[in-house]
Amino acid sequence: MTTDTTDQLREELLAAVAGANDAAALDDVRVGALGKKGRITGLMKDLGAMAPEARKAFGQKLNVLKDEIAAALDSRKQGFDAAALNAHLATECLDVTLPVRPEAKGTLHPISQTMEEVAAIFGLMGFEIADGPDVEDDFHNFTALNFPPGHPAREMHDTLFLDPADDGQRYLLRTHTSPVQIRTMMTAKPPIRVIIPGRTYRCDYDMTHTPMFHQVELLVIDTETNMSHLRGCLQEFVRTYFGVEDLTTRFRPSYFPFTEPSAEMDIGCSRKGGELKIGNHGDWLEILGCGMVHPNVLKACGLDPEVYQGFAAGMGIERIAMLKYGIPDLRTFFESDLRWLRHYGFAALDIPSVTGGLTR
Ligand code: DAH
């Protein structure tokens, strides 16, 4: 056993490592050198039969050789592993810089856009979003909202009733988003500050009415809430929504069973030349209904009217969308005409925000 032996073996093994074409061939080289019956292992076994001096010298050389070959095997293996990983990644590669396919150009419906805008504005004022079912019972849609049985205001709603149910109830499609006021007050603890966007249904169909439409409800319940809070809140909303900083508003007395006092809010506009324009031009346009929550409604929800007061408001989503975006006929919202959607739709990724811009 001489130094020549290890030098020659080193050369051979390093050449074998370099010559291995893949991980399997490399493993054969490893087994042939360092495995149980490998060549280096074999030489290690022979050490026992050698004289102590020679054993020490040759043992050291063998150890160096073993480490060197193990390192060479390891580095070559890392090369194969990296190449395998890259090959795998290449099959899963996705070029995010490619343009989107031209046929995948969807737009957001003006209803969705308007709801997002409303949520962005009230969200900034600290309102949360609440919702409730489209199929309601008489209690939530009418009775708890202070429409007693037989009350004439029920007739104004052109209610769509479902067939009588097994439990004897006559369920209905909610005629407004106000029943979610009841559901919210019965479950949440004041202070309450919510908006309730959603679908509503009435048996009606013409230029300005469709059997299904959308409303957004506003509800605030706290211990010290008054009409001027209501007015300020709504004024802030219409100014931001219509983008007219000093837009004037006016309250007219009105009637809703669930509010007392009740009002309708108008905003400034002009109708010159048959064209409607929002702004302070001397004319008025009705925009929503509102008022202070009626004590009977608070009581129906288990809240003490001596402790809590609040305000509510409701408006039509289609109506404020038509006004802002100049859409003349309500019925076109639901015709699913692609040309209409392309014309009035909004880029799906432009999320409205008060600071970033409501519409782009
Ligand atoms: N629920 C009413 C309707 O559909 C709208 C409304 C008016 C809601 C006044 C309110 C309110 O919360 O205070 O006609």
Image (cartoon, helix red, strand yellow):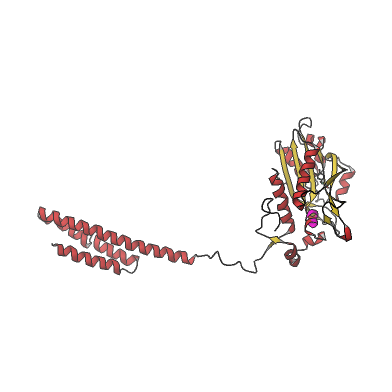
Whether residue 346 is visible: yes
Magenta residues, dominant SS class = helix
Quarter assignment of residue 313: top right
Name the quadrant of the C terminus.
bottom right
Instruction: Say if the magenta span includes residue 290.
Output: no
In the image, 354 versus 305, the foreground residue is: 354
**Residue 199 x, y percent position in the rendering:** 76, 52
Compared with residue 291, is residue 28 higher up or lower down, i.e. above or below? Answer: below
Residue farthest to the top? 306
**Residue 161 x, y percent position in the rendering:** 82, 50
Whether residue 133 is visible: no
Compared with residue 237, is residue 98 higher up or lower down, i.e. above or below? Answer: below
Quarter assignment of residue 186: top right
Q: Which residues are magenta?
A: 319-323
**Residue 198 x, y percent position in the rendering:** 74, 50
Residue in the image at 40% along x and 65% along y: 83
In the image, 360 versus 19, the foreground residue is: 360
In the image, 55 versus 309, the foreground residue is: 309
Name the quadrant of the N terminus.
bottom left
Q: Quadrant of ligand 1?
A: top right
Residue in the image at 76% along x and 46% along y: 236
In the image, 82 versus 151, the foreground residue is: 82
Residue in the image at 76% along x and 65% along y: 340
